[in-house]
Structures are given as structure tokens and as C-alpha cells.
Amino acid sequence: MICWQLQSFYYCFTKTNKPIMLLEIKHHEHYSRKELLLRSFFGWFYILIPHAFLLIFVAMAATVLQFLSFWIILFTGRYPQSWFEFQVKFQSWNLRLNASFFNIVDGYPAFGFNGSHPSIEYDVPYPDHISRVSVLLRGLFGFFYVLIPHGFILMFLGIAVQMVTFICWWIVLFTGKYPKELFDFVVGYLKWNQRVTNYMAYMTDTYPPFSMKE
Amino acid sequence: MSVDIDKNVLDDYNVPQPNEISERDREDAMGAYLMMFAAVAVSLPLPVINLVAAIIYYYVNRTKSKFIHFHCLQSLISQIPTTLSNWFLLFWALQIWVFKNWKFDNYFFIYLGFVVLVNIVYIIFSLIAAIKARKGKLYYFIIFGKVSYNAVFNRNTDLEYDR
């Protein structure tokens, strides 16, 4: 809970000023060119394959828990806390991997649920109560009022992020620096994406804002 | 109206009372019974998926507390006969319609009815057990309940529980 008080983190606020998600990726002054080259040419071999192999099974477990959580919330109004923490750790693992492939962090992404990255902070506060009506609406019509509008924008943003990542690849290669504005753009995309994921995973009641910022 | 019960008598029954069990433990115990829907969740109509999910859930959660251990174990072992009967139905159906080794007869229909009945009974009792677990209570299935109780509460185990 201490981390919530730190000013340096980005918050996503609800109307009641409660943070709905904490995702902060630290921008560094210098990025390793050697790691960039290694990751770009052999990353699929030493990062993607081992992580993906494990994440496939974890993702199946996460899917089972998410499906069951829908019904549990519908009957009890609560997301089982252990399952919620499992989802947060699974997402954190995914984020470490994504950040690595967007070249916004150096270092090998840690395996497992207890792994962490010194440059990445991710947490979702556990909600004591989840609206059953909202969950039912999301389960039945979420595709229309969440995934279509957000997905449409995120699709174009995703293309832009790919282009930015390509441009930054060359910038990092020649200068060893990642431009802060472009870095924030990539992180903003990840935040937006994550907020939509959390909302559709019934982990929050707050509709994700159409924003790359807080 | 209160009833005076000798504390020593209560201590002989090493069973946690509902007010001693946290909300988190109740939810974890309830989750054990819901693993029967794992195959539906991943959209793979294989009877073994539920059993695999129950086994994983059991090994992940069994050391959390005796209450959770009991419910996870009961859910797991009660799923074995259901899974086996489902598997045999699948095997039989494949032998008739895919491999053409066996003939389609009335015995198949009888067995189909039996398997449907077993699954319905299993689902009903599991849902009741899930609700009881959510309320912090122990619920004993026939045979499986006794086996689980003996394995968790009566046996000296090497397991070190978190709570």
C-alpha cells in the first residue's frame, strides 16, 4: 500500500479518486545497444520461446479462473482474492515480456509469478465489491461497448507503436538513448491496453478512459 | 439460549468453525469445486481437463489451510469416478462412430443415461459443497467425505499449513 503514496507513479483515477491501476515503467537515460541487437536477432530464441511455452499454460489457467470468476461475481459480488492476485501476477509477467519486446526496458524479463523488473511497477488494487449488473453487461455486451470502440482506436495506436518502436530501434542503436516523448507514447499504449484488459477481466468496475495518460 | 460445552470435548474435534475461517479461505475452498467447469472455460470437450484442473488446484492450494485442503481433496477424489465414466463413454462413442469396431446397441443408451445421471448428481452435490464452503462449512460427500476428512484432519501429515 505504501507504493500508492509515491508521487512518481502514474495513477488511473476513478470518479472517487481511487486508483484503479498502477503501471509505471521507468525511462532510463541510457539503453544498451548490445542488448538491443541481441534481443532483436535472437530474442525469439532465448526470450520468446521459453516464456511463451510457460505462458501458454498459465494463460489457460487464467482463462479458466476468469470464466469462473464471472459466475462467482455474479452470485457473490466478489472477485476471489487469490484468483485476483493470480491474474495480476500473470499480467505483470506479460507486461515484462511486452516491455522487453518494445525495447523500453533492458535486462532479461524474469520468469514466474514472483518475478519482477526493477524498471516496471504494476499493481491493481483489490476491489472489495464488483457490480454484478456491470459484470453481466460486460459478459453479454462488452464486445460492443468496450472491445469495439477501444479496440478500434487501439488497433491504429498499435500500428503507430510498431512504427515508433522501429524508429526508436535505430535511435537507440546509434545514440543509446530512447526519446522520452516516444517512450511515453509506447507506455501510454500499454496502459490503455491494460486498462481495457482489466475491465474486461472483471477486475474493476471503472470503464476504461479513452486516454493514454492517467 | 446458550449451551455449555466442555472445551476439552470441542478440542477432540479438530475441525475449524465457520467463524474461524477467513473470507479468502472460503473463496479458495469454493473454487475447488468449480474446477469441474474448467473444460467449459477453455472450450475443450475433454473429460480429463476438469481432472487436470482439480489436480493443479489441489497442489497449489493444499498447504494454505486444513479447511482448503479438505475441500480441494474432496473435490479432486470425487471427480475421479465421474471422469472415468465420461472417458469410457467417449471411448465407447469413438469405437462406434469413428473406428467402427463396436456396434451401436441399447447398452450404449443405458450407459449414456447412467453417465448423464452421474454428472448431474456430481454437479448438484459439488454446487452444494461450493456454497457450504463459501459459508465456511465442511460438507461431506458419501465415501469421499470420510476419506478426505481422515486424510486431512485425522492423519499426521508432513504438510505445513500457512494458516
Image (spheres, rainbow, N blue to C red):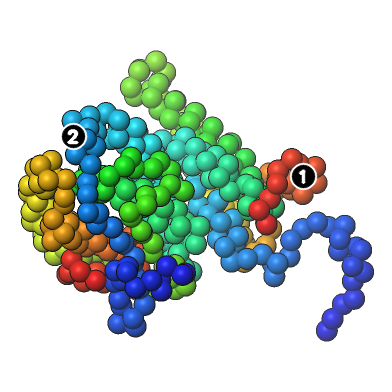
**Is any part of residue A154 visible from this angle?**
no
Q: Residue at x 18, y 34 (%)?
A: A37
Percent x, y for residue B110? Answer: 50, 34
User: What chain is tagged by disc 1?
Assistant: B
**Can you identify the residue that label 2 sits on?**
A37
User: What chain is tagged by disc 2?
Assistant: A
**Is any part of residue B158 visible from this angle?**
yes
Picture quarter with the C terminus of chain A: bottom left
Q: Residue at x 22, y 49 (%)?
A: A30
**Location of residue A197 (image quadrant):** bottom left
Q: Secondary structure at mark 1?
A: helix
Q: Do callouts 2 and 1 mark residues in contact (Cβ within 8 Å)? A: no
- Circles 2 and 1 on the same subunit: no
Residue B47 badge: none
Tell us which disc is closer to us: 2 or 1: 2
Q: Amino acid at mark 2?
A: Leu
**Can you identify the residue that label 1 sits on?**
B150
- The correct choice, above or below, for B69 with respect to A208 in the image is above
> In the image, is B93 to the left or to the right of B107?
left
Percent x, y for residue A103? Answer: 21, 45
Q: Residues within 10 Å of mark 1 (few under 14, many from 20)?
A: few
